[in-house]
Every structure is written in C-alpha cells, then in structure tokens.
Amino acid sequence: MIIPKHIAIIMDGNGRWAKAKGKARTAGHQAGAETLREIVKTAAELGVKVLTVYAFSTENWKRPKMEVDFIMNLFGVYLTRELPEFHTNNVKVRFIGKRDGLSAGVLQKMDKVLQETSKNTGIILNLAINYGGKEEIVQAAQKIASDVVAGKIVVKDIDEKLYENYLYTEGLPMPDLLIRTGGDFRISNFLLWQIAYAEIWTTETYWPDFTSDLLKQAIADFNNRERRFGGLGD
Ligand code: IPE
Ligand code: IPE
Ligand code: MG
C-alpha cells in the first residue's frame, strides 16, 4: 500500500454535526478538535509526511462574531493542550495563511508551537488558519514583484518552480490526496495552486465523526486511482 506523502483535509461539517445533536455549533468545533488529535496521531503512525488541515478560511470571518471568537479561542486552547502530544508523536507544526487579522494572543501561541516543535523530525502538521488560496497566490505575486523591483530576480526567472517558493507551502511536496468531510463537493478556496493533480476523496461523514478507519479507507481508495498527470499512464 502506497502511503500518500502529503494529505490535505477540508475538515467540514462541525456545525451540522452539532445541530443534528441539538447542540450549539461551537460544540461541533470543540468535537472537531478532538478528531484532529486522533487523525494527526494516525497519520503519523502511517508514515504520512505532511498533513495539511483547513481550520479557518479567509471567508470564515463572515460568520457571527461569537462563533469566530470561539474558534479563535479554540486555536489557542488546542495549540497549548496539544504541545506534549506533538512531542510524543514527533510532530513538527507549521502554519499557512495570512497572519494579518489574527489576534496577538493567537499569533503568540502559534509562534510558540512553531518554535517548540521545530526540531521534531516526524510528520509535518500544516495548520491552515486564516488561509485562502486566492490570497496566497496574490501575496506571492506581491512578493515576487517586490523582489523584481529590488533587483533580486528578473521577470524571466519567474516560472512555476520559483512561484512555488513564494507560496505558504514553500518546501513542501504537493498534496497527493485531498479529503473533504461533510458531504460537499467543492474546494472552498483551499490550496488552489497545490491541488492541481491531487486525488479527491469525499465522505458524507461530518468532521467530528471522522475516524482513523475512514482515513485508512481514503488511503486504500487512493491506491486504486490511476494518476496520469496529463499523460497516458502506463
Ligand atoms: C468546518 O465546519 C469548520 C470551519 C469552517 C471553521 P463548519 O463550521 O463549516 O460546519 P458546517 O459545514 O456548517 O456543518
Ligand atoms: C471550508 O469550509 C473551510 C474550512 C473547513 C475551514 P466552509 O464551511 O467554510 O466551506 P463552504 O462555505 O461550505 O464552502
Ligand atoms: Mg462548512
């Protein structure tokens, strides 16, 4: 069985999970954080190299302030609480997304976890917080333009490989497998550049009910896909 090097997950369905149980949407986010703990552990055990998870999009600010505040607070709680677990599982944490807009408190906790797990050598957990695929591509264009103006590069240097060095995912392999929970079939502005050739796998299961067995099922199904990358396969 081939284990995908990089798995990306759109962790969707927290609110509907809660609603179905007669609970507040926030209870769904809380339960979702528990699921993430289990999935990180399983992905690490399976030998996945990079796990990128969509935790908060640049569009999620449109939600009621109370829900946004709850999610932001949950990030802080999660990052603090998981730190020992990250060390146990040798997890190196990274973040993708726009720092602008996040509170000083959340940024401080993110920086602490980033720094404290920087020497871990196992799975990279790439947390997408205040992440938008379009925003990522725009900020890359801005930085490239600045570097041209500063004389660090010339226009002719700009190719796909160079561009990728300006994305938040710099240095990481492209996702092989993209999982979306919660039953919708859309990308919702996630990793627009990086998923060019990712295999997509979806489940009706809401994120808080997602399990290690479902992750293994997704990987098993991935093994039955024929990736052709525009060629004819062989
Ligand atoms: C995903 O679950 C978590 C975030 C977007 C922060 P949702 O909160 O989108 O849950 P549904 O899709 O409304 O059920
Ligand atoms: C995608 O879910 C974002 C995250 C999982 C963080 P959304 O719930 O925001 O996506 P849409 O609005 O249904 O497309
Ligand atoms: Mg949703």
Image: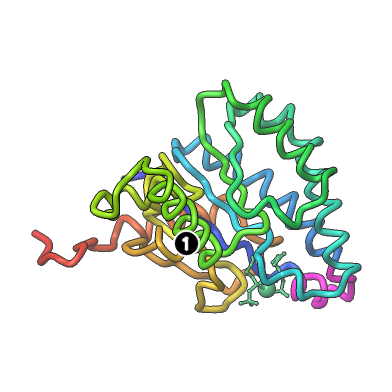
Residue 19: x and y, percent?
82, 76
Specify the quarter for ligand 1.
Answer: bottom right
Task: Check if residue 21 falls in the magenta segment.
Answer: yes
Nearer to me, 77 or 2:
77
Residue 66: x and y, percent?
91, 68
Query: Residue at position x 62%, y 48% from top?
Result: 127
User: Predominant secondary structure in magenta?
Assistant: helix
Amino acid residing under circle 1: Ile
Nearer to me, 212 or 130:
130
Residue 36: x and y, percent?
67, 49
Looking at the picture, does residue 155 appear above or below residue 119? Answer: below
Magenta residues, start to end:
15-25
Task: Check if residue 43 falls in the magenta segment.
Answer: no
Nearer to me, 69 or 155:
155
Q: Quadrant of residue 224?
A: bottom left
Q: Is residue 71 left or right of residue 11?
A: right
Colour style of the rendered protein structure: rainbow
Q: Which residue position is annotated with label 1?
A: 137
Q: Is residue 170 left or right of residue 28?
A: left
